Image: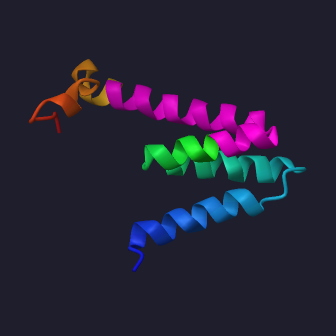
Amino acid sequence: MLGQTALFTTGVLAAMLLADRRSQVAATVAATCVFVLTMKPPLAVVAAAALLAAGCWWSLVAATAGVLLVLAAAVGWWGAELIGCSARASCPG
């Protein structure tokens, strides 16, 4: 049985794959889907590879910019020790 996150992931991947690649709105939808899938990094890599194979460079660049912006905001909020936090038992916040 699929869990709630599996249903969400399936929906996001389906939205990304079914979007019409010829429009700017669809490219934005695909970029948003990849950005959301970074919650599950292996699936984000698969989605990014699919976009590269389809020749959708703009979507991948936009998603990467969004991820880097959120990372910069997180480091600004919690400090640089956030980067190595996952290796330790205690994290800020």
Residue 73 is at least partly visible in this image? yes
Quadrant containing the C terminus in the rendered view: top left
The dominant secondary structure in magenta is helix
Q: Position of residue 51 (x, y in %)?
A: 72, 43
Tell me if 35 is positioned left or right of 21 in this view: left
Residue 38 is at least partly visible in this image? no
**Residue drawn at 76 percent across, 35 percent down:** 58
Tell me if 85 is positioned left or right of 66 in this view: left
Q: Position of residue 48 (x, y in %)?
A: 63, 41
68 or 84: nearer the viewer: 84
Q: For residue 68: magenta? A: yes
Residue occupying the far left of the picture: 89
Against 77, residue 15 (above or below) is: below
Q: For residue 61: magenta? A: yes
Against 52, residue 8 (above or below) is: below
Q: Which residues are magenta?
A: 49-75
**Residue drawn at 25 percent across, 27 percent down:** 82
Residue occupying the far bottom of the picture: 1
Residue occupying the far right of the picture: 22
Q: How is the image coloured?
A: rainbow
* Number of numbered discs overlaid on the protein picture: 0
Q: Position of residue 45 (x, y in %)?
A: 55, 41
**Residue drawn at 39 percent across, 80 percent down:** 1
Q: Position of residue 39 (x, y in %)?
A: 43, 49
Against 73, residue 39 (above or below) is: below
**Residue drawn at 22 percent across, 33 percent down:** 86
Dividing the picture into quarters, in which one does residue 62 lie? top right
